[in-house]
Amino acid sequence: MKTAVAVRFPLGRYHATPWDASVNEGRVEWPPSPWRILRALVSTWKTRLPDLGEDQVMALLNALVTDPPAYWSPQTALGHTRHYMPSAGHVMNKPGKNRDLAFDAFLAINPTQELIVEFAPQIKSSQQELLSTLVGALPYLGRADSVCHARVVNSPAEKANGLTLYEPDWGGDTRLLAPTPPFTLRDLSESPTALRQSKRLDPPKTRWVQYKRVAQEWSPRAPAPTRSRSPVTAVRWYLPDSGRPSIVETVALGHLLRRAVMRQTRDPSYALSGRTDSGPRSDQHQHAHYLAFSSQGDGRVDTLAIWAPGGLSQRDIAGVARLRRLSAPEYLRRLGTYRLGLEVLSSTRLALPELVGPSREWTSLTPYIPGRSWGDWTTAGKRIPHVTDDLNRELGYRGLPQLVHIEEVNKPEWRRFRRARPHHSGRKPPAISLRLVFERAVPGPLALGYLSHFGLGLFRPSG
């Protein structure tokens, strides 16, 4: 059996400019070249799995491309959008030739079908596990818009309907860039700018391979899922440096994010809306949590996220990926308009590593508000027992272990936090910052209490 990698593009689009083409030529590299695939794996290794050894990774990559791979491709259709970008002499609101036309070419792909990249050699079992780890963490292939889910599969023994074979053939009309073993990490890491400065057209240790396109009518046996494939349970955006909102506006930002996502999806699912046809969901908080926090701890929100423990559907993912901007209405004039940069659509562990754990000790990132009201909040001797009882009740809903210790953390800034959703009138409930200790390590993320689906009651592992 040969080694194969199956790649699916859940957004239904693939963006990638060929090595020997300009962006404005409107060409798309398909199938993804072996050079592109290996560089994507190197990027994933260095940014997401830095603990992997260089010798093992490079040995795997050299073994994969001993011979050029074959591809089994789903049907694709070429499309593009046009953008008029301001030129150097651009003047606002003045007609004339002061804008440059830019093409954004892409391929439309069925989001339920997989591209199968069939590598010739059968690699060792240890290398198979390493490859599964790398491709399971691959966030995109091509440009960052090309979000993907990848997994290692056995080379299909039966052919599949609707897939087209691309195989190496000198008489073919498709040309792909492939590495020439043996190559090093430095060979794979050369930037286009460095290559142009050295007056080279092609990267070192590479060759061009011709591929012949052969239409096939075969229907693959569906490969068994592997452990590396996980459902999309989290989405993460970053906010640019300028004008970041204060962390005290967490609830308002969660409210705005939910409203924006609901508009993008048009027909919101139960996972995003938190409601069924008969009313609010009652499945123990498996629907979306809209989070806003500071990953740098500077009191300014630099990260927005959606965490849905029950997972997101393909329609949810497509709608969420369209979100590029968050705008506050007039009644939230303290907030403004923020550009959003989509970082990752993936499992919670990959998308929100700072919130995951596992850990026995957790500390408040945003204040906790008990789900049940309590009259005598000023007396610590009565406040802590009430909070303990309330927290254990919340943990029971989520199937988490009970607490063995609760400690109040002196963070007076909780009084500045917004403690009600916009348009919700009434008295603001009291809040508290805590350090929690469990009887055993829990995985996280941990969001508890009132308004936990809008960013409050969020804890970070501290042990």
Image (cartoon, rainbow, N blue to C red):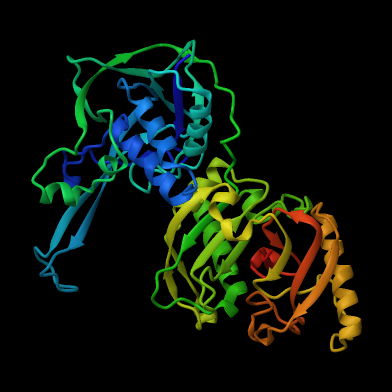
Whole-percent x, y for residue 79 in the image: 29, 39
Tell me which corner region of the image, top left, top right, bottom left or bottom right, holds residue 353. Answer: bottom right
The extreme bottom residue here reads 378
Answer left or right for 111 relative to 23. Answer: right
Front residue (pair 422, 139): 139
Q: Is residue 97 visible?
A: yes
Residue shown at the point (26%, 29%) measured from the top left? 178
Is residue 360 placed above or below 134 in the rendered structure? below
Front residue (pair 310, 315): 310
Tell me which corner region of the image, top left, top right, bottom left or bottom right, holds residue 368. Answer: bottom right
Residue shown at the point (45%, 22%) measured from the top left? 123
**For the image shown, how many numbered marks are present on the structure?**
0
Front residue (pair 159, 294): 294
Answer left or right for 224 relative to 373. Answer: left
Q: Is residue 457 visible?
A: no
> What quarter of the picture does the C terminus occupy?
bottom right
Is residue 390 placed above or below 341 in the rendered structure? below
Whole-percent x, y for residue 173 in the image: 18, 21
Answer left or right for 412 relative to 314. Answer: right
The extreme front residue here reads 55
Whole-percent x, y for residue 72 in the image: 39, 21
Answer left or right for 375 relative to 338. Answer: right
Front residue (pair 397, 434): 434
Is residue 96 placed above or below 92 in the rendered structure? above
Residue shown at the point (65%, 77%) measured from the top left? 423
Whole-percent x, y for residue 24 in the image: 17, 46
